[in-house]
Image (spheres, rainbow, N blue to C red):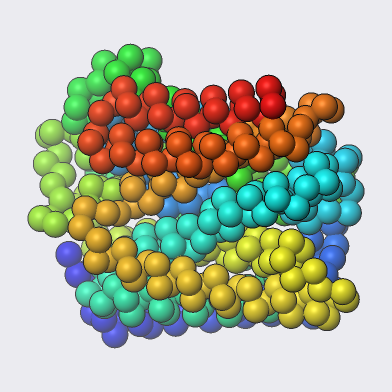
Amino acid sequence: MNLISPNLGYLMLSIFGAIMILMTFAFGRWGNWRTKEAFLAADRQVNWFWGGFSIAASWIWAPALFVSVQVAYQMGTAGVFWFALPNILSLTIFAILAPKIRQLLPAGYTLPQYIRFRLGSNRVHKIYLFPYFFYQLMAVVVQLYAGGSLVSLLTGIALPIVMVILAAVVLTYTLISGLKASIVTDFIQLATILIICLIILPWAVHVAGGFQSVRLGLLGINRVSGILDKSVAFSFGIVTAIGLIAGSISDQSNWQRAFAVKKDQIVKAFIFGSILFGIVPLALSTLGFLAANPALHIVLPAGVDVSMIGVQTIFQLLPKWVIVLFSIGLLAILSSAFDSGLCAASSLWATDVSYAKNDRDSVSAARKSMVGITLIGLLVSLGILYIPHFGLEQLWWIFNTIAACVMVPTILSLYHKNLSERGVFWGVLISFIVGVPLFIYSNIIGHPVWIVGSSLSIVGISTTVSLLV
């Protein structure tokens, strides 16, 4: 499926990197980025419009781009419903949570910092740092893996080389001015994918034969009867909803923006962000419906992961150069989630680990942590290439499952006045020790009842122990 030569692929990556770096310099470098407030929280002066774009862009991970199309292709409208709705709700819920944490910790930077303040416990603080750092590491790994796979598929450039180039580009522009750089590039990257989708998707539908071609694929290749199909709701819907909502609550990039947006505009920013986000997976699902239409004969090449079905649909329906344009849009928005992960990890390190005493040391610690997590993420991404039958889907459910261990205790910490430090510590720890291995084993054997039960057990254990101990 190599559509462009490796030399043109290198040129495309170079142009993409140059644009991102120059835009960051233009809008971020010359501002007041040298303080901890600016580098980690953008001086807490981000308005709702820029904040909404940044919130949406940082939440558009590879699953939103590729899994949304895959579930539309496989499970039709039912898959899209159970994927898109929890995704949108996971951001909307911050319209409630974000104002609360700003009220309780106005000058805060991270959720684990708040937990330490709220419960006065170093051991709970430490146990919280694991899922929060792990989630940001996965933000780096997933975007590198998905973005690298896409570029490698189109250009024939070896996947490890693409991963190294992408890591270098995103790290470079994020180091310039921290969260300010991320917010500027978030706007550019989300606007890019929205404009490209506005051009390409109606074109693809028209070439395929109009809305009638979309309608013939609404049931997916598995011929699922409707959005409330019981088998999809049970096996896919419950686990996805828990994972996505837990993931958003355990994603420091959301809390970082909760602390960065102007206090009186937080609600508007997260609602606007959730709407902007929802447009992307819902629009892209059109490609999955087209691919599921048997009359169009959309077929993946041998050995290509099913998550690339949207790319294959564009490839078969439209002129070959269009797939390059589409891929640039996908690459741009993947980089947004990548740089948001770096910023979030740097805020965790500078605030919760290094305890730097002045602005200069804080910014230095934040930058060093960006380099560190990029290198670790790159090594993990390269390691995954050698694990059989392991890809984007497996990465997705692992990090969302770990995130589920702290979901309810986090919400309780904001609203339950008598929450026990011992309850939270043991609730989260037991969920890690019992629930996560059970969930992983359930997925290995592929038993739907076990998968749903183990997912619910993680939430149930952490909730019950937190409330009763």
Residue under the point 24% across and 66% down = 386
Please say whether residue 43 is visible from this viewpoint: yes
- Please identify the quadrant where the N terminus is shown: bottom left
- Please identify the quadrant where the C terminus is shown: top right
- Tell me: 136 left or right of 122: left
Q: Residue 422's quadrant in the figure?
A: top right
In the current view of this chain or complex, which residue is farthest to the bottom?
7
Please say whether residue 259 is visible from this viewpoint: no
- Tell me: 275 left or right of 87: right
In this rendering, the answer to whether 461 lies above or below 300 is above
Name the spot of residue 125 as percent of width and height, x first.
71, 51
Residue under the point 28% across and 48% down = 307
Name the spot of residue 461 as percent of width and height, x first.
55, 28
Residue sitting nearer the eye, 219 or 197: 219
Residue under the point 61% across and 73% down = 370
In this rendering, the answer to whether 298 lies above or below 73 is below
Q: Residue 225's quadrant in the figure?
A: top left
Name the spot of residue 6 as percent of width and height, x first.
26, 81
Residue under the point 11% across and 41% down = 297
